[in-house]
Amino acid sequence: MRTVSYSDFKSRFTSAIGVDSLLAVEETALKNSLNDRVKGAWTRARWPELMSLKEKTVAAVSSPIAADKAVQIDNDSDIMDVFAVFDKNPLSDRTAFKLEYQLINGYLILPADSKHTSIFVLGNQVTPSDYGTGTTAIPRFLERYLLLACVAQFYKEDGQLEKSIQQQALAEEALLLEMDRVERLEAQNRITINTYPSYSFGVNILTTI
């Protein structure tokens, strides 16, 4: 995934608001705004750049729920939202099947009669919450939206409400353009996956992970 550094992002932010540098309190506000806006944008679409395919081990659990075939996902460090589950890696094995599952109380549950001991989970990456401190690489495809949104928040906190509204409108427009790009990618980049039961039919997923 292409990224932009936080230092470059901050430089463009200061240029956008017409200052040479930020006071410590202003930079803290920028980091808070940046992380808040990232969280909001992260789940607005199934961004190809944020897709992740991970193999998980299936096991029995007894607490907080009882299930014979389960994977705990609420404490996962590499998958946030689950989009699909497969018996094999669907990107390298054309015989992979899409599996039925349920999400209950932080666990991904397979049918009790499932024979699978491991599965492949397709979802999006966990949202970082420390941009500007621990995480310094910002997704480039979200840069314009985040920059405009952070500028809008700056103007709002500075009492310049008209400028804030204008920048927020531009930010939303930038995000919608990126969402339109994703829709076009979904139409262009697909592979066919088999699904259970025994009769099969095509199920489309993004090929860009």
Image (cartoon, rainbow, N blue to C red):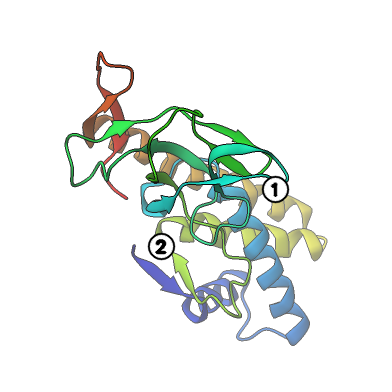
Query: Quick check: 137 above or below 21?
Result: above
- Find disc 2 in the rendering and name its residue: 140
> Residue drawn 41% across and 45% down?
121
Give the answer, above or below, for where 184 lies relative to 198.
below
Quadrant into which the N terminus falls: bottom left
7 to the left or right of 204: right
- The CA distance from mark 1 to mark 2 is 24 Å
- Rendered location of residue 112, percent (x, y): 51, 29
SS category of the residue bearing label 1: helix
- Identify the residue shown where x is 73% and y is 86%: 23
Q: Relative to 116, does residue 136 appear above or below in the rendering?
A: below
Residue type, label 1: Ile
- Kindly indicate whether the residue at mark 2 contacts the one at mark 1 (C-beta within 8 angstroms): no
What crowding class fits label 1: few (fewer than 14 Cα within 10 Å), some (14-19), or many (20 or more)?
some
Tell which tag, 1 or 2, sits nearer the viewer: 2
The numbered mark, 1 or 2, whose residue comes first in the sequence reads 2
In this rendering, does residue 126 appear at all?
yes
Which of 53/150 is in front?
Answer: 53
Q: Give the total of numbered labels.
A: 2
Q: Secondary structure at mark 2?
A: helix
Residue 188 sits in quarter: top left
* Amino acid type indicated by mark 2: Arg
Q: Position of residue 199 (x, y in %)?
A: 25, 13
- Kindly identify the residue that appears in the image at 40 percent across and 37 percent down: 85
Q: Please give the residue where the numbered disc 1 appears in the rendered image.
A: 165
Q: Is residue 171 visible?
A: no
Q: Position of residue 171 (x, y in %)?
A: 56, 50
Other residues around mark 2 within 10 Å, as few (<14) / some (14–19) / many (≥20) = some
- Please identify the quarter of the rendering in which residue 200 is found: top left
